[in-house]
Amino acid sequence: MIVFDKLWQTMREKGISTYTLREKCGIDSKTVRRLRANDNIETKTLSKLCTVLECTLSDIAEFIPDET
């Protein structure tokens, strides 16, 4: 499972709000909800996030294996 817990931490560290993401990236509120719920996200969106946050993918997402 891919989780986006690191995204929220990186955003806090850089002082970037979800409002800023929506304005600078063109990410809509539906996508923000999907990120909060750890739902599937397009790679295009991940690229936009990394660009705006000036970070790498590992700074915003993490793979956690299923226990099953």
Image (tube, rainbow, N blue to C red):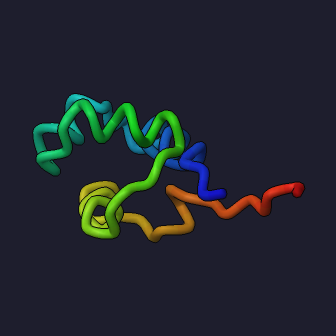
Q: Quadrant of the N terminus?
A: bottom right
Vertical arrangement, residue 19 with respect to residue 51, above or below:
above
Vertical arrangement, residue 43 with respect to residue 19, above or below:
below
Residues 15 and 51: in front is: 51
Task: Tell me where residue 42 appears, x and y as whole percent.
Answer: 32, 62
Vertical arrangement, residue 20 with respect to residue 24, above or below:
above
Residues 14 and 30: in front is: 30
Q: Is residue 60 left or right of residue 17?
A: right
Number of callouts in the render?
A: 0
Task: Identify the residue at horizontal 37%, vertical 36% (top origin).
Answer: 15
Q: Quadrant of the C terminus?
A: bottom right
Q: Is residue 31 left or right of residue 41?
A: left
Task: Tell me where residue 31 appears, x and y as whole percent.
Answer: 30, 41
Task: Tell me where residue 43 appears, x and y as whole percent.
Answer: 34, 69
Vertical arrangement, residue 44 with respect to residue 24, above or below:
below
Q: Is residue 48 left or right of residue 36?
A: left
Residues 65 and 14: in front is: 65
Task: Tell me where residue 33 appears, x and y as whole percent.
Answer: 38, 31
Q: Residue furthest right?
A: 67
Task: Identify the residue at horizontal 43%, vertical 42% (top origin).
Answer: 35
Where, by quadrant of the figure, is residue 18 drawn? top left
Residues 52 and 22: in front is: 22
Q: Residue furthest front?
A: 68
Task: Identify the residue at horizontal 60%, vertical 50% (top origin).
Answer: 3
Task: Identify the residue at horizontal 78%, vertical 62% (top origin).
Answer: 65
